[in-house]
Structure formats: C-alpha cells, structure tokens
Amino acid sequence: MPEAIPGGWAPDAPGTCAAPAIEDYALIGDGRTAALVSRRGSINWLCLPDFSGPSVFAAILDQERGGRFALCPTDPCTTARRYVGCSGVLETSFRTGQGTVRVTDLLPVPDGTGALAPMREVLRLVEGVEGTVELEVLFEPRPDYVRTKPRLARRGALGWACAWGDEALLLHADFPLQPTPDGAGLRGRARIGAGERRALSLSYAKGDIGVVPPLGEAAERRLRATLDWWEGWSSGLRYDGPWRDAVLRSAVTLKLLTFALSGAVVAAPTASLPEWPGAERNWDYRYCWLRDAALTMRAFTGLGLRDEARAFLAWLLHATRLTWPELRAVYDVYGRTNLRECRLDHLAGHRGSRPVRIGNGAWDQVQLDVYGEVVLAAHDYVLGGGRLQRDEARALAGLGRAVCRRWRKPDQGIWELRGPPRQHTFSKVLCWLALDRLLDLQARGHLRMPDEAGFRRERAAIAETIEARGFNSALGSYTADLNGEAPDAALLLMACLGYRPAADPRMRGTYDFVEQRLGRGRGLLLRYEVGHDGFASPEGAFGICGFWAVDNLVGRGELEAAERRFAELLAFANDVGLLAEEVDPRTGAALGNFPQAFTHVGLINAALALARARQEGG
C-alpha cells in the first residue's frame, strides 16, 4: 500500500522530519554489513566495516545529530517499495504530482578477487519512470557513533572523500553536490525525467587504497551481477509449503544477517532500538547469541541450505575454542567475547528512548542453556546428512563433560536476566537435551564418549530435578524457576526441541498456563511477566514466542488453530516482510532491534512444521 510522505529533508531546520518508526525500515546488505533504509529513502543506519563496527550513519538513534544518506523527492509524494524477487535488493517508487521515480538500493555482493572493487559499497540507482521529479540528496557522514568529525574534500571527477583516521568514505554521484552550511555534509538537487538514469556510489576503505567504482553502465552491471547472485543462491532453497513468500523472505533476511566470512549469524543489524517506548531496555544486538543456535540450524537444514548449515556449525565450534569447554552467551562475528558495554549519552535515542548502548554485558554471563543449543545444532546438522570432523566431535564431547560438571549451578537463563543467578527450569532442560543428543550421536557412530555411563547418570539426575522441582502440580505447568510459580514462554520449547511431546499432559498444561498469563491476543506472547527481569517497565510481546506456540499446536494435531495463529503473527510483518524482535500489543508497532533473525527463524520453523503436518496428513 503506497504511503504519503512530505517532500524534502529541510536539513537547515532540524526536527522538521518526523523520525521513522522501526517498521518503516527495509534492510539491504552484502553478507559483511547491512544498512537500514527508511520509506523516505534515507539510509539511517550503517556500520563499517562489518555488522558490529562503528556506525557512519545513525539517524535511527538520533534524528537530528546521527547522520544519514538521503535521497527523496522535494515535493510531497506517495511511496511504495518491494524487494526485487528473492533478493536483498530494494526498489522504492516515489510518485509526486509531477511524475514517478524509482530508486534501487543495494550493497553489491563481492564477486571474488578478479576485479578491483571497494571494501564495501552502497549503490543507489535512480530511474525516471514518468513525468519529471526533483530529487534531493543529503549526505551527512557521522563516523564512530557521531564521536568523530570527518574531513570532507572534493576529488574532482572522482567525487568527494570523507576521511577519518585510516578510514574513508568515497561518494561518486551523478548529482551536483555542494557542502552544507556547516561543512559537515553534502547536499544537492536534480530533476529526473522519464527514462533518465542516475547513480550514486558510496564506497568504503580502511587501511588500504580507496576504490571509486564507475557509474553508468558499470553500475548497472553491478546491480545485475548482484541480482544474479541472489537468484543463484535462492534457487537452492527447498520449500513449497504454505506461506511460501513469507518463508523465502525470512530466508533472505537470515542470509543478509549471516557474516559471509565466518558463517556467524547476528541477532540483528541494529543497536539500542527500544523494547518499549521510553523505557530502559535498549540493547546492542549486532552479535551472535548461542541461544539461537539450535533453531537457526533447524531453519538452515529444513530449507536445504547445506552450505549455510556447514559454515554455521563450523563457526559455532571453532569460534568458541578460546573459551572451550566453557561457553559464553554471546560472541562477535569473529568469535571475540570482550564486548564491553557502554552508553552513548550524546545520542538522543530512537524517538527519545534512552540510554543508547553499544557492546553487550551479557558476554560474561553464565547461561547453561547454550550447551544444549550448540549440541542440538550439531545433532540436527548430522540428521540432515552432515558429517562431523574429528576435532568437532571431540569439542562436542567436551561440552557434554562441562554440562555434567555445571548443570546444578544457577545461571542467568535464556533471557540473560541481569539480576542474581537463578535455577532456571529451561536451562536444566537444555542441559538434559545436550547429554541426550550426545548419547544419540555416539549411538549413531558420530563421536566417542569414554564416560557414557556417567553421561547417562547425569541425564537421569537432570530429568528427575526437572520433573520434581520444575513442574508445579498445583498450576499443572512447568515454571520459569525450580520450585517456582512464574510462567516462561521459553518452556514451550520443551516440545519444539523434543524434551516432551506437545500432546503430553504436562506440556498441554504448560501451554495453557503460558497462554493464560502471557498471552496478549492476536497470537502474541510476552516472554515473562513484568518485573521478572528486575525492570519495572513493561516490554513488548516477544516475536518468536508466538511461533513456538504455533509449533506446539501443530504437535498437538490442532492444525487449523496453528494456521490461524501463524496468519495472525504474519500480520505484524512490515510492507516488505520484515519482523522485529518484539511487538507492541496495544498498537501492533514494531519494537526492539530490527529485523530480528530469531523472529524470522521462528517463522521458518513454524512453517516447516505446518508443511510436514500437512504432508503427513494427506
């Protein structure tokens, strides 16, 4: 549905452009980093040289000071956008009273070492469709989270250079550009007639020569090469079930959030987008959480993405070597763990939601569920036809020994609560699953565990603890903590991951308890009750939890109810099919970091479960 927007950017009058909502953004990327583009045609977030590098545009976190790379009609217009086929290439059409223009945004996918190419490039292609439209360009680089003032210099026919330290942005454009009054940016306008084409290329270099890619037909070739790459990649997707378009878009989003150089999958490309307006839950999600591993691997194998599955497992088992056999909760794309958290108090926050944080303090938490997540990922990979290397098998066995030593300890749990450690029921379940799946891998001949009897004893002890202390008979449900009374939506994963069948009476009771206490209508679930995490403020419904409920309904044979719930959850995707971390149950607005890999993983796995149930039923 086209959306009406005002014209121009009025950079000389800060505050005149309303900050876009979280759901107003689309994602483009090249497997190294990603940018968020608003409906208004403004790139308001880009980190370089990779996902967790410092931002160079951060208007999403401070509309006035954050910086942007905008391209928009000067007159009021309506806008409609779409992704080109099954790709990460975005098309936005702007229609004014005088005509229509189409802007195509992408990060060209590198084509190897055969050609001289920039380290990273943002390519924006403009095509006049009908009539004449005046476009305005606004380039406001604000490196290092607006903590560094760059140097702008004209480079003649090669455009403009913006340099700081050993880094540089090079802007080559088919637009006349002049410095803004403050000298910290560039601005220009051009009238685009029907059939006319223009291009803007923003390239990046760090510690190396800067490459300025040519425009014109060469830029069109980079677009075609990128579309060809996406077409080749998407041809390997294996899914013909219900809601195919949504599943394929989720697969593309997952690919856009996969770091091509290591196979790691970042939770989201953004930092500090609020989980509730004006509250304090603003976290940096540009890292890789092990808690997502099992379900992410299930999505890869279920869609037939063997290369992604192999690379992801290799990253899981090799990036964690420095801490092995102990596992951290979160790593960056290179496997580094010292993700020191700090506040950027000079930034206003998304729509005024402070504080703005970078880094993530969860890196040094104890989260025992991650052992099960990694082992489950390896188990699913093997069941999908993969083979473990000898060192990987040894690493997995070592994780099992760590579980035997540590499972009785309290931890911060899957939701990385920042208060004192607790005896989380779900953490015990994942420890049980770790030992259970390791024993199965040994039975299948994929690894050797000298202390098999010890593993079996500890597995039995964990199960006894879960059933005696993690299940509340008065409530008829498993609870968040041992000997507790609080609900936890993560307990739905007990069925999804195979601890107990969804139709088991204890799982039915848990589903009903979670739905009663955490359900917010329209398929939405909170992950826990207000105050459970030590914060007094509320938060949104957690996106993936609703898809776990769908999976439970499928396991109970209630396919019609599962499909209704799935359709309700799909309604919270934005116009280009992207889902956030959370949803405001009052308004349906997106909350939290965006787009969220975990939510899209949930969509994929729920759809796969529905597809299997349909096939088995007939």
Image (cartoon, rainbow, N blue to C red):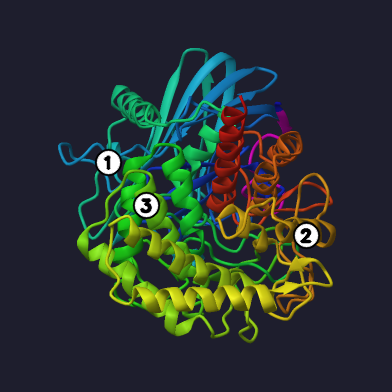
409 is within the stretch colored magenta: no
List x then y, in percent, for residue 463.
57, 73
Kindly identify the residue that appears in the image at 37 percent across and 46 percent down: 31
Whether 328 is drawn above or below 6: the answer is below
Magenta residue span: 3-17
| Residue type (three-letter) at the residue carrying disc 2 | Gly
Q: Nearer the viewer, residue 89 or 418?
A: 418
Kindly identify the residue that appears in the image at 51 percent across and 49 percent down: 180
| Residue type (three-letter) at the residue carrying disc 1 | Val
Would residue 68 appear left or right of 143 to someone viewing this image?
right
Q: CA distance from mark 1 to mark 2?
A: 62 Å
- Tell me if residue 44 can be seen: yes
List x then y, in percent, for residue 288.
45, 62
Kindly indicate whether the residue at mark 2 contacts the one at mark 1 (C-beta within 8 angstroms): no
In this view, the mark in front (1 or 2)? 2
In this view, the mark in front (3 or 1)? 3
Which label number is shown at residue 509?
Answer: 2
Of callouts 3 and 2, the N-terminal one? 3
Whether 430 is drawn above or below 31: the answer is below
List x then y, in percent, for residue 45.
52, 52
Residue designated by label 1 = 212
Q: Secondary structure at mark 3?
A: loop
In this view, the mark in front (3 or 2)? 2
| Residue type (three-letter) at the residue carrying disc 3 | Phe
Would residue 274 appear left or right of 307 to someone viewing this image?
right
Q: CA distance from mark 3 to mark 2?
A: 40 Å
Quadrant in the picture for the N terminus:
top right
Would residue 198 appear left or right of 16 to someone viewing this image?
left
Residue designated by label 3 = 259
